[in-house]
């Protein structure tokens, strides 16, 4: 933990919807909902006007339409949002060389790299950043300042919309005490329910239970980490470069796919899109991954690991097709995805055809690996 609130967390306000409102004056002040518009679509972002009707991100679009039938419903324009995000990230990097992007609209910044060593300097940097973002993009962002990443993120959430919250080091435990355990990193629905059944719903309950009890409930690593978080102790650094581990694309279909030929065509189309994204990122990869969600919501993943990295669309397409052959699609398919992992910044053209197939799911862990080509 730092002795000064020199970690900044920026979270743009209702980013996708706000970007659409800024681009289209007719939408300003009106409820705007961005997301998939099909029967199985979900809300990506709802403007604050739409949130007054109870609409929120990750909500099924059908439910959003019932709550706000007169809102503007828009398909996401990711290239447009990415261009705005790049402007915001440039402003962050002008503020500090240590910027850790989390998504298009969210990032951590280490202000110590700018020489900010006290609360007054940190606040001034945060206010200047918010003003610069508004001037350059016409959009607002909320800023949290604290001595740790966890508290800075909590601060930006408390500051929404269009505000700044500074959490003084030393006040963390008092702040966290009454808050839900779900606010802590690593506490999702399953862990939250497990803790609730044990009578722990607030962060103060975790502190009172003690580290030993949390370790008993959750295991050594998770229990210890959660106890420290509940005390406000978070020493994670701001990491300037977040390594890309994989590139993937997927589609959810409005109507389940049943035709085997049609499914194959969709897989090949996804492979082409995935490879285009892979090349745009400047990477190649060794492992091709196919994801299939069936009619009953069961999800299968298959993978094939090549002898060398590739960014060749035909290689990715053919590998994804081979993986599809091992999947039973009887009953229908509701989602397909193709990804590439094991990324590198080079390719080995002469090794494309030499592949060793490796099942990522449903494989016997005791089975021998496939023989190398030519052995």
Image (cartoon, grey):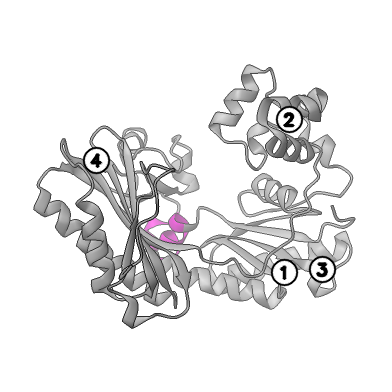
Q: Earlier in the sequence, mark 1 or mark 4?
A: 4
Q: Which residue is mark 2?
A: 215
Give the quadrant of the C terminus.
bottom left
Q: Is residue 128 above or below residue 221?
A: below
Q: Which residue is mark 3?
A: 112
| Residue 329, percent from left and from top | 18, 42
Which tag is nearer the camera, tag 4 or tag 2? 2
To which quarter of the image does residue 300 belong?
top left
The kind of secondary structure element at disc 3 is helix
Rendered residue at 57%/36% (across/down): 188
258 and 11: which is toward the camera: 258
What label sits on residue 39 in the rendered view? 4
| Residue 268, percent from left and from top | 20, 62
Q: What is the C-alpha distance between the residues marked 2 and 1? A: 43 Å
Q: Which residue is mark 1?
A: 128
| Residue 353, percent from left and from top | 27, 73
Taking the image as drawn, is residue 75 in sight? Answer: no
Magenta stretch mostly in which secondary structure?
A: helix
Rendered residue at 72%/69% (across/down): 128
């Amino acid at each position: 933990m730092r002795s000064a609130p020199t970690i900044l967390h920026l979270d743009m306000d209702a980013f996708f919807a706000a970007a659409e409102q800024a681009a289209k004056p007719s939408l300003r002040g009106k409820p705007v909902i961005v997301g998939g518009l099909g029967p199985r679509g979900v809300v990506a972002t709802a403007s604050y006007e739409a949130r007054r009707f109870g609409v929120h991100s990750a909500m099924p679009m059908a439910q959003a339409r019932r709550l706000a039938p007169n809102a503007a419903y828009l398909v996401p324009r990711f290239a447009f949002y990415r261009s705005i995000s790049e402007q915001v990230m440039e402003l962050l990097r002008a503020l500090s060389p240590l910027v850790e992007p989390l998504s298009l609209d969210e990032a951590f910044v280490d202000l110590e790299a700018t020489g900010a060593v006290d609360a007054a300097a940190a606040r001034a940097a945060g206010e200047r950043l918010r003003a610069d973002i508004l001037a350059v993009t016409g959009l607002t962002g909320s800023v949290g300042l604290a001595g740790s990443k966890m508290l800075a993120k909590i601060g930006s959430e408390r500051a929404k919309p269009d505000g700044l919250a500074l959490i003084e080091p030393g006040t963390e435990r008092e702040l966290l005490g009454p808050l839900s355990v779900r606010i802590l990193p690593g506490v999702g629905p399953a862990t939250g329910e497990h803790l609730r059944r044990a009578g722990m719903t607030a962060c103060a309950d975790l502190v009172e239970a003690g580290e030993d009890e949390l370790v008993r409930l959750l295991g050594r690593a998770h229990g210890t980490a959660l106890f420290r978080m509940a005390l406000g102790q978070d020493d994670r650094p701001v990491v300037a470069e977040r390594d890309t581990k994989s590139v993937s694309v997927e589609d959810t279909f409005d109507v389940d796919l049943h035709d085997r030929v049609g499914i194959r065509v969709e897989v090949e189309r996804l492979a082409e899109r995935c490879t285009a994204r892979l090349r745009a990122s400047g990477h190649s990869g060794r492992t091709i991954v196919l994801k299939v969600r069936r009619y009953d919501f069961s999800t299968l993943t298959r993978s094939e690991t090549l002898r060398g990295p590739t960014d060749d669309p035909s290689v990715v397409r053919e590998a994804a097709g081979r993986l599809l052959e091992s999947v039973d699609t009887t009953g229908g398919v509701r989602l397909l995805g193709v990804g590439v992992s094991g990324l590198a910044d080079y390719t080995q053209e002469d090794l494309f055809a030499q592949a060793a197939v490796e099942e990522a799911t449903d494989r016997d862990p005791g089975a021998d690996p496939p023989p190398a080509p030519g052995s």
